[in-house]
Image: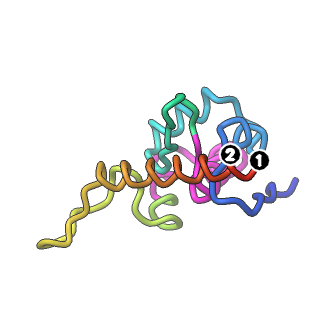
Amino acid sequence: MSEPQIPDKLTFRRKEVMQLAKLDGRVLDYWEKEFQAFAPVVNRSGEKFYSRRDVEVILAVKLWLIKEKRDKNEIKDLLLQNFGDLAGTAPAASGSDTVDPEKLRRIRHGLDEILTLLAKDDKK
C-alpha cells in the first residue's frame, strides 16, 4: 500500500483531507489536539482549511501511528525531527527575535481567507 499523492495545492478543505488520508473528522480533531503539529484555519463560516504542510503532517502521523504502531511520545519526537517547530511548541528565541504564535496564527488565518476568496472568484 503506497502513500497517497498530495495534490499540488496550497490549501485543502477538511473534506478533501479526510478523503485523502482516509480518516474521520473526529480523528483529525483528536490528532490536532494531541500532537499540536498542525493547526487548520477556520474561516468565518466555520469551515476548516488545512495547509499542504498540515496534510503532510497528518499523513506522517497516520503512517507512524497506524502502520508502524509507534506510541504518541515517539510520534511527537518524530514530528519535531521531520517537521521542525510544531504549533504551540516552538522554543522561545532569544532577544527581540521572539515570534508570537497567536500573531502568526492570525496572519495565517487571514491569508487562508484570501486564498479562499480568490478560489471562489476563479469559479465565477
Could you tell me which secondary element the residue under label 1 belongs to? helix
Question: Residue at horizontal 47%, vertical 45%?
Answer: 39
Verify whether residue 86 appears in magenta.
no
User: Can you tell which quarter of the image residue 53 is in?
Assistant: bottom right
Q: Residue at x 46, y 38 (%)?
A: 34
Q: Which residue is mark 2?
A: 120
Q: Is residue 113 left or right of residue 16?
A: left
Residue range of the region highlighted in magenta in the rendering: 49-77
Along the line of sight, which residue is nearer the eye, 118 or 27? 118
- Give the structural element (helix, strand or loop) at label 2: helix
The answer for how far apart the CA atoms under marks 1 and 2 are is 5 Å
Q: Amino acid at mark 2?
A: Lys
What's the amino acid at mark 1?
Answer: Lys
> In the drawing, does residue 120 fall left or right of residue 94?
right
Disc 2 packing (10 Å; few <14; some 14–19; many ≥20): few
Q: Which mark is residue 65?
A: none
User: As drawn, which residue projects farthest toward the front?
Assistant: 124
Q: Are marks 1 and 2 in contact (CB under 8 Å)?
A: yes
Q: Position of residue 78 (x, y in %)?
A: 51, 60
Q: Which residue is mark 1?
A: 123
Q: Is residue 46 above or below residue 60?
A: above
The residue sitting at 50% across, 49% down in the picture is 38
Residue 96's x, y, as percent?
13, 71
